[in-house]
Amino acid sequence: MDDGSTPRRTGVVSAWLSLFASSATLVCCALPALLVALGAGAALSSLVGVVPQVVWLSEHKGAVFAVAGVMLAVAGAWQWRNRNAPCPVDPALRHACLRTRRLSLRVYLLSVALFVVGGAFAFVLPWLAAR
């Protein structure tokens, strides 16, 4: 039985998945660059020793960014599709529906911001430094 909550759940799930994907772009590229810039190379070395997958993420940053970009595009499409989805008539449920919709949009926008910051550290700043 469909209770009408599927579009809302889809929007929230897509926003959280996009946040997860875009945070991977920060781990692969922005975090190591920030640690080195702050002179915390030893901390980066300890991080790689504890979580060696950071190296794999850095080596495959193109794929990481491609997957994150696709997930952000899908999440953005779901956000757009659900922007005017109906909410229940009951005032309490309507308030919860609208609050969830706003939270989902904020999480999505945070995901896009993290993706842009990670992309700047991974692709733009190295390109500018090489010039």
Image (cartoon, rainbow, N blue to C red):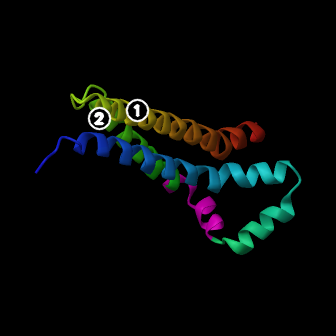
**Place of residue 60 in the rendered image (x, y in percent of width and height, measured from the top left):** 56, 60
**To which residue does mark 2 refer?**
93
**Earlier residue among tags 1 and 2:** 2
Query: Which region of the structure is painted magenta?
Result: 53-63
Mark 1 lies on a secondary structure that is helix
| Label total for image | 2
Disc 2 crowd, CA 10 A, few/some/many (<14, 14-19, 20+) = few
**To which residue does mark 1 refer?**
99
The residue at 37%/41% (across/down) is 75
Which residue is at the far left? Answer: 1
**Place of residue 64 in the rendered image (x, y in percent of width and height, measured from the top left):** 51, 55
**Residue 32 versus residue 10 in the image, above or below:** below
Q: Is residue 10 left or right of residue 117?
A: left
Position of the C terminus, as image quadrant, is: top right
Which residue is at the far right? Answer: 39
**Place of residue 76 in the rendered image (x, y in percent of width and height, measured from the top left):** 38, 36
Q: CA distance from mark 1 to mark 2?
A: 10 Å
Disc 1 crowd, CA 10 A, few/some/many (<14, 14-19, 20+) = few
Amino acid type, callout 2: Leu
Amino acid type, callout 1: Arg
Which quadrant of the structure image shows residue 5? Answer: top left
Q: Residue 57 colored magenta?
A: yes
